[in-house]
Image (cartoon, rainbow, N blue to C red):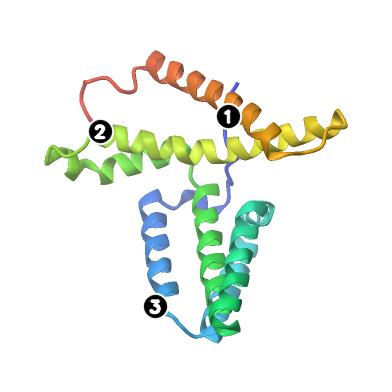
Amino acid sequence: MIMPLQKDDGPLSRVPPEAKLLALFAASVLLFSLSSPPALAAVAGLLCLATLLLCRSALVAWMKAWPLLLTIATLGLWTWFARGPEAAAITVLRLGSLSLFATIVTVTTSIGQFIDTIARLALPLERLGLANARDIGLAIGLVIRLVPEIRTRYSGVIAAHRARGLKVRPATIIVPLVISTMLSADEIAHAIDARNLRDTGPRI
């Protein structure tokens, strides 16, 4: 059974999804327009403080996302050797702040809200005959839903290896992870068909 994502019920959850996505876009523009480590550090500090006050669950979820944080740290280390410590600080502060902001949006917005919002934003493409708005919203919603699901299944495979005293190797992890993910995707496909989410009826 696919369990729903935990959603924060704080004040940010009552903000319209469109406003949060617009704020995320504006934050990304701001972060990538700044090239001063002190300025980026100030923005990151304010963001962390606001998250601590308004949405602690997002901060906890962000800190638990160790693959993402490890990737940012690796990019920062590579940038340090390639371009120096200042460029590394800029990279880490930009990506760290942006990922935290994205986590806030994800934690305070349900998957259904994401799908509906993206579908509404994609309506101009549908009117031009370029895409199906409902399909775009559904696809993005499924990606958002399956990323933490895959991470959970990965942790389960690792725990099963350790419980059996097996050495953790990529070759022994990938196969069960891919199989369980494909089974989960098959369940989702059946659920979509059962609910007629991709019919040819009226659009949003």
Q: Is residue 62 shown left or right of residue 120?
A: right
Q: Is 63 drawn above or below residue 200 in the view shown?
A: below
Image quadrant holding the C terminus, namely top left
Residue 44 pos. (x, y %):
57, 73
Q: Earlier in the sequence, mark 1 or mark 2?
A: 1
Residues 58 and 148: in front is 148
Badge 1 amino acid: Val
Outermost residue on the left side: it is 128
What is the C-alpha distance between the residues marked 1 and 3? 39 Å
Residue sitting at x 18%, y 43%: 125
- Residue 80 percent coordinates (x, y): 60, 77
Residue 109 seen in the current view: yes
The residue labelled by disc 1 is 178
The Cα atoms of the two marked residues, 1 and 2, are separated by 34 Å
**First reached walking from the N terminus: tag 1 or tag 3:** 3
State the residue position of label 2.
204
Instruction: Name the secondary structure under disc 2.
Output: loop
Mark 3 neighbour density, 10 Å: few (under 14) some (14–19) many (20 or more): few
Residue at image coords 40%, 49%: 17
| Residue at the image position 55 percent from the left and 21 percent from the top | 183
Residue labelled with disc 3: 33
CA gap, disc 3 to disc 2? 35 Å
Q: Amino acid at mark 2?
A: Ile
